[in-house]
């Protein structure tokens, strides 16, 4: 067993699984909305990302640590964003910035 920590691999795994869990939340939302095309595309990307992580932690089980952290962060912040977006939608607010009227700036 290899117990060495490679910082570059750890950073890559963290961001890979952060992105994976962002996609996973979006995948669940797409499936619940019966959007087959979007769900299928997200699923393919998720399998690709999972393969990278699996290869890394099979070769060195200590690599599971950045996977766990990235997964938690990705899920937590994506759900917080979706909750905020849903609440703002109920209130009729928009998340994007207000339109700037350039003729009033000059």
Image (cartoon, rainbow, N blue to C red):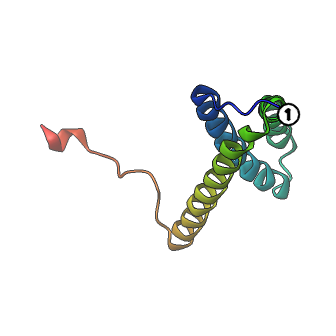
Picture coordinates of residue 65 (x, y %)? 69, 46
Residue 46 position by quadrant: top right
Picture coordinates of residue 29 (x, y %)? 76, 55
Look at the picture and state if 31 lies above or below 10. below
Name the residue tied to disc 1. 58
Q: Residue furthest left?
A: 106
Look at the picture and state if 85 lies above or below 66. below
Q: In front: 25, or 89? A: 25
- Residue placed at 23% from the left, 39% from the top? 102
- Decide if residue 33 is on the left or right side of residue 92: right
Crowding at mark 1 (Cα within 10 Å: few <14, some 14-19, many 20+): few
Picture coordinates of residue 50 (x, y %)? 81, 36
- Residue placed at 83% from the left, 43% from the top? 39
- Residue placed at 72% from the left, 38% from the top? 63
Q: For the N terminus, give its image quadrant.
A: top right
Picture coordinates of residue 92 (x, y %)? 50, 68
Look at the picture and state if 61 lies above or below 78. above
Residue 62 position by quadrant: top right
């Amino acid at each position: 067993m290899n117990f060495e920590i490679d910082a570059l691999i750890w950073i890559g795994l963290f961001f890979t699984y952060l992105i994976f869990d962002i996609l996973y939340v979006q995948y669940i939302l797409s499936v619940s909305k019966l959007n087959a095309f979007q769900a299928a595309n997200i699923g393919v990307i998720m399998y690709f990302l999972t393969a990278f992580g699996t290869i890394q932690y099979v070769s060195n089980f200590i690599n599971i640590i950045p996977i766990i952290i990235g997964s938690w962060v990705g899920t937590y912040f994506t759900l917080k964003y979706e909750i905020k977006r849903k609440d703002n939608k109920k209130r009729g607010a928009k998340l994007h910035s207000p339109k700037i009227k350039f003729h009033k700036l000059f």
